[in-house]
Image (cartoon, grey):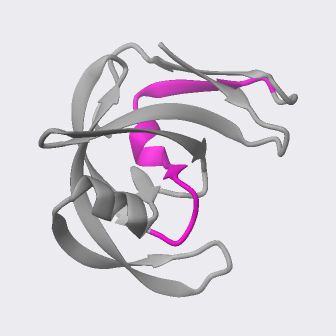
Amino acid sequence: MMQGYVNIGYEAVISLVIKHDSNLKSINAVIDTGFTGFLSLPQSIIDELELPWSYSDFATLGDGSETLFDIHDATIIWDGQFRAIEINSADTDPLLGMKMLRGFRLQVDTVPGGMVKIEALPLVSES
């Protein structure tokens, strides 16, 4: 199980550790249920960690517009395990998306300082 908190802006926040080679960085990411990817990071953090570029892809934003994102490879510590993921380069604060939450339960006590809990579900089918 992983725990986070609700900030004063009513955003659910979780701390993550990102790893590439010998580079490690701890970040706070806002959970964004409208983001279908794994994790987005600003280019400055991607550069700091020297994350390798993988490919570029189009994505539809919340306002319906499309934009091109660079995708990078990284490893994060997730539920006590190393997990290889794709990271979108985005001009925003770090965002944790729904692909990261697949197979997990998200519980949010939606008050400033409230608890955010992410815990693994029993076996999830691949459907």
Q: Is residue 24 magenta?
A: no
**On the image, which quarter does residue 89 sit in?**
bottom left
Q: Is residue 113 above or below residue 95?
A: above
Residue 99, given in percent of the width and then of the height, sits at 40, 46
- Left or right side of 6 for 33: left
Residue occupying the point 58% across, 86% down: 65
Residue sitting nearer the eye, 18 or 86: 18
- Left or right side of 19 for 15: right
Residue occupying the point 26% across, 78% down: 56
Q: Is residue 106 magenta?
A: yes
Residue occupying the point 37% across, 64% down: 88
Residue sitting nearer the eye, 43 or 104: 43
How many labels were placed on the picture? 0
Picture quarter with the C terminus: top left
Residue 17, given in percent of the width and then of the height, sits at 37, 33
**On the image, which quarter does residue 29 sit in?**
top right
- Left or right side of 28 for 113: right
Residue sitting nearer the eye, 120 or 11: 11
Q: Is residue 5 above or below residue 127?
A: above
Q: Is residue 62 above or below residue 87?
A: below
Residue 105, given in percent of the width and then of the height, sits at 54, 24
For the magenta stretch, what is the residue range?
90-109
**On the image, which quarter does residue 93 sit in?**
bottom right
